[in-house]
Amino acid sequence: MSYTVLAAIAVVLALGIDQLILGTKVTSTRAWWVAYSIILFFQLLTNGWLTGRRIVQYDPNAIIGSGSVSLLGDGRLIFAPVEDLAFGFALVLLTCVVWTRLAPPSRLAP
């Protein structure tokens, strides 16, 4: 299975767990999107540095685009494959969903 397919499955599962299974609805809040935009900024910096310097490399058959590393285009954004953004979104979302679900009710924001 390619990284593209795994990243897409991870996003769908994380959103399903958030909205349907646990019903935390984290992604329905403005706070989530503000926090995620901050995380995304640093994810792009980190992934861009690691992939732009070729410290981390991807099999071109497992990602969108070719194996060439470019700043923008060919399935890449700030050098990193777009799949990294999807996988990172799912990872951060699932962590926040579980954190929210396990938090005592008195600690949750209204």
Image: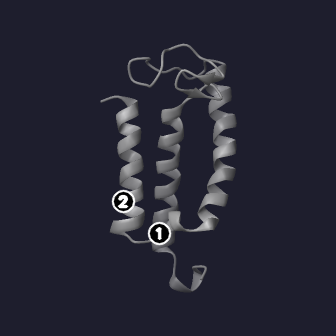
**Residue 106 in which image quadrant:** bottom right
Judging depth in this view, the residue of 54 and 19 nearest the camera is 19
Question: As drawn, which residue projects farthest toward the front?
Answer: 73
**Residue denoted by label 2:** 16
Type of the residue with mark 2: Gly
Tell me the element at label 2. Answer: helix
Badge count? 2
Position of 84 with respect to 43 (left or right) is: left
Q: Amino acid at mark 1?
A: Lys
The quarter holding residue 56 reads: top right
Q: Residue at x 47, y 64 (%)?
A: 97
Is disc 1 surrounded by few (<14), some (14 to 19) or many (20+) residues within 10 Å?
some
Q: Residue furthest bottom?
A: 106
Judging by the rendered image, the residue that carries numbered circle 1 is 25
Q: Position of residue 80 (x, y in %)?
A: 58, 28
Could you tell me which residue is drawn at 35 percent across and 35 percent down? 5
Q: How is the image coloured?
A: one colour
Q: Position of residue 39 (x, y in %)?
A: 65, 49
- Which residue is painted at 41% across and 39% down in the image? 7
